[in-house]
Image: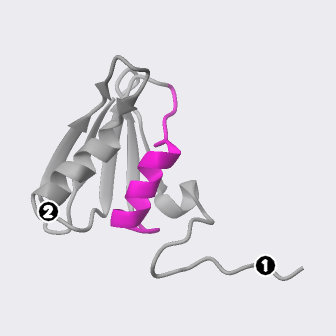
């Protein structure tokens, strides 16, 4: 899996899955965002993920980073390397109830 995260200023930061021997890995989305943060970027309105899977969306941990640094309106594109098809989602579509600083979750009344 590979990822490109575009910062607000147009810079693009790349990430790839980093596999570890202890059944743990750092996912491409998180790596790309962290690279951008280290370079001084703070917001990422566009994330592009490439994989060979039929359909792919970021995991919960990666979505946490995307929500924190991209917000609900972040556009997430999935590119299937085999079929050359692209699908587009917003972060809100993938995680509709995720609270962010600008939209804190409120308890539901019963």
Question: Mark 1 — residue?
Answer: 108
Observer-nearest of 15 and 73 = 15
Image quadrant assignment for residue 36: bottom left
- Residue shown at the point (31%, 64%) measured from the top left: 45
Residue 10 marker: 2
Percent position of residue 92, x then y: 53, 63
Observer-nearest of 19 and 103 = 19
Assess whether residue 56 is covered by the magenta stretch. yes
Assess whether residue 50 is covered by the magenta stretch. no
Which of disc 2 and disc 1 is earlier in sequence? 2
- Residue shown at the point (31%, 57%) measured from the top left: 46
Q: State which region is magenta.
A: 54-73
> Which structural element holds mark 2?
loop
Find the residue positioned furthest to the right.
110
Q: Residues within 10 Å of mark 1 (few under 14, many from 20)?
A: few
Percent position of residue 19, x then y: 32, 23
Percent position of residue 44, x then y: 27, 62
- Position above or below: 72 against 11: below
Percent position of residue 47, x then y: 32, 51
Is 67 on the left-hand or right-hand side of 50?
right
- Position above or below: 105 against 36: below
Image quadrant assignment for residue 29: top left
- Residue shown at the point (73%, 79%) measured from the top left: 107
Is 2 on the left-hand or right-hand side of 91?
left
Quarter the C terminus occupies:
bottom right
> Which structural element holds mark 1?
loop
Q: Is residue 88 visible?
A: no
- Position above or below: 12 against 53: below
| Distance from Cα at disc 1 to Cα at disc 2 | 39 Å
Quarter the N terminus occupies:
top left
Q: How are the colours assigned in the image?
A: one colour
Find the residue positioned furthest to the front.
22
């Amino acid at each position: 899996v590979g990822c490109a995260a575009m910062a607000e200023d147009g810079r693009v930061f790349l990430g790839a899955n980093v596999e570890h021997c202890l059944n743990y890995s750092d996912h491409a989305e998180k790596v790309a965002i962290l690279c951008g943060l280290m370079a001084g970027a703070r917001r990422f309105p566009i994330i592009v993920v490439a994989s060979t899977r039929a359909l792919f969306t970021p995991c919960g941990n990666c979505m946490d980073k995307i929500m924190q640094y991209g917000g609900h309106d972040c556009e997430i594109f999935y590119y299937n390397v085999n079929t050359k098809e692209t699908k587009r989602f917003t972060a809100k579509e993938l995680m509709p109830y995720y609270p962010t600083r600008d939209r804190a979750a409120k308890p539901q009344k019963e």
